[in-house]
Image: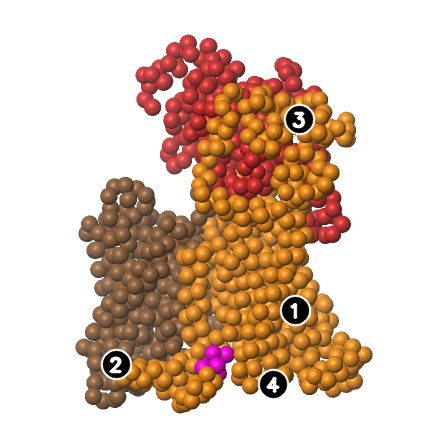
Chain colours: A brown, B red, C orange
Amino acid sequence: MSTIDTLGRGNAFVRGRPLLSVVFLVGFALLVDLVHGMYTGRIPLENVTRLFWNGLLVGLILGLAGIGLSMTYSILNFANFSHGDLITVGAFSGWSVTYLLAGAGATEFGARVLIDANLNVTVLSDPFAVVVGLVLASALTILIALVVDRLVYRPMRDSSGISLLIASIGVALVLRHLVAFVYRAHTRGVTGGERVDILPVFEGAGNVSVNTATLMVVAVTLMIGVHLLVQRTKLGTAMRAMADNQDLALITGIPTERVVTWTWILGAGLTGAAGFLIVLERGTLDFNIGWGLLLLIFAAVILGGIGSIYGAIGGGLIIGLTQSLSTIWIPSDFATPAAFSLMILVLLFRPSGLFGGVSTA
Amino acid sequence: MSEQAAEPATEVGDRTTAGGESNATDSPPPLRVTNLEKHFGGIAAVDGVSFDVHEGTLTGLIGPNGAGKSTAFDCITGVYAPDAGTVEFNGEDITGLEPFEICNRGLVRTFQIARELEKMTVLENLMLAPAGQRGEALWRSVTPIARRGVAAEERDLRERVWETLEFFEIDHLAEEYAGTLSGGQRKLLEMSRALMTDPDVVLLDEPLAGVNPSLEKKLLERIHDLREEGYTFLLVEHDMDVIMNHCERVIVMHQGTNLAAGTPEEITSNERVIDAYLGGEV
Amino acid sequence: MSSPPGTDADSTGDGDGGSRSDSDADAASRSLLPETRWQRDVVLILATLLGIYALFALIGLALDFDTNGILNVLRELTLFAAVYAMLVLALNLHWGYTGLFNIGVAGFMAVGVYTMAILTASPDATAPGFGLPLWVGIVGGMAMAALVGLVAALPALRLRADYLAIVTLGLSEIIRLTFQSMQFSNALEDALGVATNGGSGMNFPGTRNVVQYAFYRGGDRTSEPTVLGDALFGLGESFDVLPLVVLGWGYNVVLAIGVVAFYVLLVRIANSPFGRVLKAIREDELVAASLGKNTDLFKIKVFMLGCALMGLAGILWQGQAGYTSPHEFRPELTFYVFIALIIGGAGSNTGSVLGGLVFGTLLFQGPLYVPRLVAEGLSVAGVELGPPPNTFYDAALALGSLDPLPMLAYATAGTNVSYLRFVLLGVVLILVVQRRPEGLLGHRIETAAAVDLSNRSRTTATDGGSSNSSSGSTATNADPGSMPTNADPGSTPTDDRRDSTATTDERDPGSTDGDPDE
């Protein structure tokens, strides 16, 4: 990275502050408008709750996957453009396992392993298959990530962040198209079409299916788990130290290679799980699933401040909710551009993230 | 100013006749720093330093590690915007200007850790420096007729570059990538490159650090030669012998402010300086 | 001063054996006059292109293509080769020269193409445009791409490289999603009466019309050919080449002109003080600023110019079909350009062209011929490949029972080969970054100057061109003067060159010409 920006050149541009306040002001105005609109009935309450719920689910996925991206960004010092495709790897490998277990005996093996048997799995119908699938989604994604690290990134440990970034673009191409080669390109329905309602949220606002409720519970549990791991264990301390200052960490005798390995294990594990879980929300799966999410995950991580796991979670929720709720005001085609715009604004005016860039992992 | 710069080949001659050893006492000093402050977080790296650098002198800036010398350099040359205080150059307030604006006024600096442009040859490094090159305009560099003028100017510059390389005795390295040079050679490269900007005042940040003794001698000789040409130097250096034997004036910084200024003799007998160096916390 | 010769810093350099042999090789290439080297580069590029043509012509022959078929294969190759060469050159300006890590290439292309399309499309079309002349569209497209580049550049240029990457990628996706949006198209239609038609894309009179106008009266393929068209069609006919193929090759001429124009422009920039500042910004921006260069201004100019060129490359690319859609401008396109640039060698314009050629043909188009070659090869060997299995699983089962043919059939079937192509591209990218980050030509020294710096021509009667020519400098530079550089001439000379320097004490040859300022 260029040293020029590390030398704060405050004299050059008055940095950001006025514009940042404008951003906050706009956000506040929208909030006021939202409350007003709901109060007057101009914006139907059920729309808001539905959008909020959808945004929350997507936000949790982004946050979960974002933790992994944030960790590799701060500890390995590069923006990993293949991170989205780790989601894809997790989704496909995990659901292959779930389908193998869920449809055992019912349909032929080949169709199940390629997730082509129309089983319409739900958490209620095949709880065991889903749990095992989730665990193995993590495990297989970890395996792939470690193999990739061994083959691609480890020989390049001393290279610049940009070289690693470029290499990760290559990794992204390889992973995604290997998945496409094996599973083909079609979009497949994976989970049950019918919703199993467990708790009505708001009158008329639709219901929460058991699949999405599972998503939520698992995602939050995993997040709490990471929190405990990072705060309570020696490994977590070492990771935080490395994220802060790699050279210093080396001097103080932290075994960096081992920390790197654990970074991949944690990061890829969570990312694989996120890949598995997002299918619960979407119900469908295709090989571009992760690539399509990559930039949104970057947005989440940047918003929260690179290197912070809590930032990634918070950023994920903000991005998910922004993307979802923005459709109250703007055409739905611009929901994703709105999220990207938010990311760009944050990068320009507050590159340390909305929460002040406190590195916690 | 920029008109002159556009005729680089004549600059050195100009300086010799105009600059020289003249001691116009009522004209402002080339460089005057007043109450400069720079804070990083809660730490005051530079805490109200003030000094003048007189024309045609070789002035030493010394102080213990962490005294704020390099930060002061950075504030003077626009790398950092100072939090308070002023920097005047030839009577003009240049506080907070961009580095390029400051350089184009005739105040150039070198870096403590030599920052050569690694994947550029030594020749390119030097060719880069002169100000106001016509070929730096995009349209001139691509339009056929204007390019002739650019080429002509390049030929003139090339002569000056080679002469400067010879002056610093690194001409045999001319076509090497700067990144392949040794530490000492990089220091020479940096200084020669800085001089190619036709400065009035040159700030040298530890030009002798990591330089072997024979090269150090050569560098100092070059500095003396140039000073006699009319260049003004401000030199950060740790080696007391160098400071005492070569500088006319010495400024001592300590804990972000100036402790004393004077001739080497005055400095060596200054109680506060002795305290700071021997008794003080470093 | 009296240090023994050669003990000064010069000889204490870190130059080891390896770098020495490198520099010897460089010295050999430098000893050629720039023109010669320039010509050599052009020869290299043309030879590569001809080699690729020959290879694919052989492939065409192997596949029993007729003349028109082979010419069509080569025409398509030329399109990709030329477009990638132009894109890589433009990106080289950003990244190779200035170090600006712009991965929004596809977005800037889209801006150029869509602006051109909107300006030139007929007002009666499904996606109506303004119906303006072609050249207005081209200029407008480039200008708009430059403008969007400016908007991106102004705040973004102070970002670190990886942040700039994410910002430009985000911007490029915003642009693509905008053009993909039917809601945007409708809004545009309401406001200006023009439309982009969202994801279905839009037709516009592409740059191919230039060729049609040159070949047909009134630019209409149903009308009479022009004199030029008549002659060329006639020539084609005598070799059984269809008029349509001739027309297609006519567009290749447009593309070739484009590549040459890009190349000349970029080489000129590279060999200029402007380009020197760009390189300095890439190496260390603070140094460039400390040497008096307004680096922001340079970066903005370069960003705008590069974006305009990306827009133009896009226009020439999509103008070949006269149709564009947002799907063409996925981020992958940007990555392809990066792969091509890295293969060729970032920082070298000749390398950029070579990278574009090799990528566009061998890596991008080449793999698509593999299935037919495999089938052909097997049938020659008397092996029937058989219908491909439906799934990877079936193919893998067969492979497990030691029958490789079904897997081969699966791998070469339909879109599967293109997935494998992307895997190949990824592997190539990783390997190049790992093993040869300088690319094919990036290792060589391309000096940024408008003249040969090692050649001190003013002081030598003959433009010898070698660095030793500086030995002639002593004679003419005897002006009394400024600074005595070598107080002890005896200390230095170790070779001819040093001999000359020792006596060249004057720093100011300019004063012999008289000082215009006095």
Give the secondary structure at mark 3. Answer: loop
Q: Nearer the viewer, residue A358 or B277?
A: B277
Q: Residue at label 1?
A: C255
Crowding at dot 3, Cα within 10 Å, few <14 / some 14-19 / many 20+, comes out as many
The tag earlier along the polypeptide, 4 or 1, is 4
Q: Chain of mark 4?
A: C
Give the secondary structure at mark 1. Answer: helix
Q: Are marks 3 and 2 in contact (CB under 8 Å)?
A: no
3D distance between C-alphas at marks 3 and 1: 52 Å
Nearest-to-viewer mark from 3 and 2:
3
3D distance between C-alphas at marks 2 and 1: 51 Å
Give the secondary structure at mark 4. Answer: loop
Q: Chain of mark 1?
A: C
Q: Amino acid at mark 1?
A: Leu
Left/right of residue B230 with respect to residue A112 in the rendered view: right
Residue that sits furthest to the right in the current view: C227
Q: The magenta stretch spans which residues?
A: C369-374
Query: Could you tell me residue A161's position as x and y percent?
Result: 41, 52
3D distance between C-alphas at marks 4 and 3: 71 Å
Residue C302 sits above or below residue C219 on the image: above
Whether discs 3 and 1 lie on one chain: the answer is yes
Whether discs 4 and 1 lie on one chain: the answer is yes
Q: Residue at label 2?
A: A99
Q: How many numbered discs?
A: 4
The tag earlier along the polypeptide, 3 or 1, is 1
